[in-house]
Image (cartoon, rainbow, N blue to C red):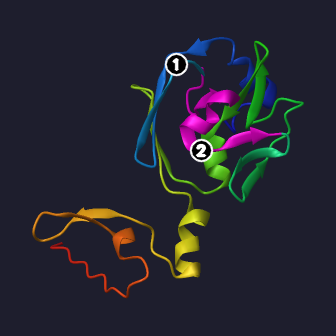
Amino acid sequence: MKHLGLAAFLLTFAHAATAATILYDGDTATVEETLSDPTDLWVAASELPRVNDFELKPEGACLDDICVPIRQEEDSDIFVTRRDTGWVNVTELARRIQQPIVADHDSQTFSLGAIPVQRQSFVRDGVAPDFTLQDWQGNTVSLSDFKGKKIMLLSWASW
């Protein structure tokens, strides 16, 4: 993308591509229409919340207290308007917030990792994220089951 001029790059968005599958936060979203791009995932702005929980607002793409400024009145490397629809570059958004993203372009499958700023909050606040596992007797137990109690978390791995 960086080796093309912006005008040449934007000309590649003449037609919609096939559907894409996006994996994020334990969920799978299928987007029926994306913009053609050999390296990045572009989705309609209306699909953004289903893809990565962000919402396009006048000030930019926002999720809780994270907001990435996006100018929507002109085409850029993160936003374009095609066929009267605003399209957001999910890959560029992930780059800007340092979110890991892995793509299989042949199958149009994209996997988004955890957002570093969100993961840091539990370390800063001293609060572990909730999770559910089976105990040694096979019972399903969640960390939230012990809210208000002192517990010790012990983990072990064989590698």
> At which x and y percent is residue 69?
81, 48
Position in image of residue 143 (x %, y %): 35, 71
Kind of residue at disc 2: Asp
Q: Residue at x 52, y 18 (%)?
A: 32
Which residue position is annotated with label 2? 53
Per the image, label 1 sits on a secondary structure element best described as loop
- Viewer-side residue, 123 vs 7: 123
Q: Quadrant of the N terminus?
A: top right
Q: Residue furthest left?
A: 137
Q: Residue at x 69, y 39 (%)?
A: 2
117 to 48, vertically: above or below: below
What residue type is disc 1 on?
Answer: Glu
Give the alpha-carbon distance from disc 1 to disc 2, as whole Å: 17 Å
Quadrant of residue 146 within the rendered picture = bottom left
- Which residue position holds label 1? 32
Q: Is residue 50 left or right of residue 5?
A: left
